Image: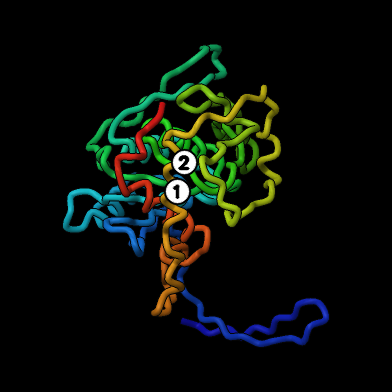
Amino acid sequence: GARVALQLQTGARPPRRTVLTVREVRELDVTSAPLPGVKGGWLIKVQKFAPGGEDRLAAALNVAAGAERWPRAILLDLRGNGGGVFPVALAMLAQLTGGAFATVVTTRDGSAEMPIKAREGGALLPQTSSIVVLIDIGCGSACELVAAALRHHRGALVVGGRSYGKATLQDGLPLTTAAGRVLVTIGHFSTPGGAPIHGRGVTPDVSLSAARRFGQRQEDQAFVLRLPDAGAPSASVAIAPLQRCVATLPPPTGRRRQPLQADATPAQLAVDEPVVQDAIGWLRCVASGPALARRR
């Protein structure tokens, strides 16, 4: 509740004063907000895969379901998600895919391939729910696995910009003589279809030029190994009918009529972003009919 007066100056510009009120900052890793213009549609934003994230995702999906049993359409915003706890990402992926899945991981113990099965549990999303995944170059590591697996197993449409291209797994070993730990790379993973991600990233089915751009983080440069190049996997849905559908949509109706509260969640703030508005259009078309048959 304390108020702090600050004087700010940039370069040679005249200084300006502002007053800030001290508040507790809560880091929200999973947030959600309804999508305007999409019946039963919700934006779910996952900032990172943190411990307990699967429970927060389940709560968000239950809120989104409302009077219906399931949310009908989901825009999953993974922009800027640098990864996190791998088992949490798998558990959340199991909720979104409606069951178990397998991916390919090469480990340091010499085993060629190891299937990873997500934790079994109640399937929160049936195959009838439509999913569009929004990524950018800030999506890395487990985030890239989730995007690729949703495209492969759920026929999700991936939109935005190419992801970062870090498909390695690390274990943290604590130091015995000093504070800190050493990160040891223990393996790498590919898409469920076997396409490499490391050094290449996940290529979206639809490029949205307004996708947020991140520079390469210094601490990640050591992880960007140079693996053999390979072609990008094909889209999981037929793009041409979607393009025709999107072309017929009216432009967004504008920004919110009511100002957002000071404690608005990242998902509520993101709904007004131009790139999210574009992604909402694609989600409307994905959810609109059977012409968008899945393609394997």
Judging from the image, the colouring scheme is rainbow
Cα gap from disc 1 to disc 2, whole angstroms? 6 Å
Q: Residues within 10 Å of mark 2 (few under 14, many from 20)?
A: few
* Residue that carries the numbered disc 1 in the rendered image: 244
Residue nearest the observer in this picture, 236 or 143 = 236
Q: Is 39 located above or below residue 195 in the figure?
A: below
- Is residue 24 at all visible to an observer of this figure? yes
14 with respect to 212 (left or right):
right
Measuring from the top left, give residue 190's x and y in whole percent: 52, 26
Residue at the spot x=47%, y=47% of the render? 243
Q: Residues within 10 Å of mark 1 (few under 14, many from 20)?
A: few
Q: Could you tell me the amino acid type at mark 1?
A: Arg
Residue nearest the observer in this picture, 185 or 181 = 185
Residue 149 lies in quadrant: top left
Question: Which numbered circle lies on residue 240?
Answer: 2
Measuring from the top left, give residue 238's x and y in whole percent: 43, 36
Residue 126 lies in quadrant: top left
Residue at the spot x=41%, y=50% of the render? 245
Give the structural element (helix, strand or loop) at label 2. helix
Question: Which numbered circle lies on residue 93?
Answer: none
Residue at the spot x=56%, y=24% of the render? 187
70 with respect to 130 (left or right):
left
* For the residues bearing labels 1 and 2, Cβ distance under 8 angstroms: yes
Measuring from the top left, give residue 257's x and y in whole percent: 40, 79
Quadrant of the drawing holding the C terminus:
top left
Measuring from the top left, give residue 20's x and y in whole percent: 55, 81
Residue 116 lies in quadrant: top left
From this viewpoint, which residue is outermost toward the right?
Answer: 12
Count all numbered tags in the image, as a single digit. 2
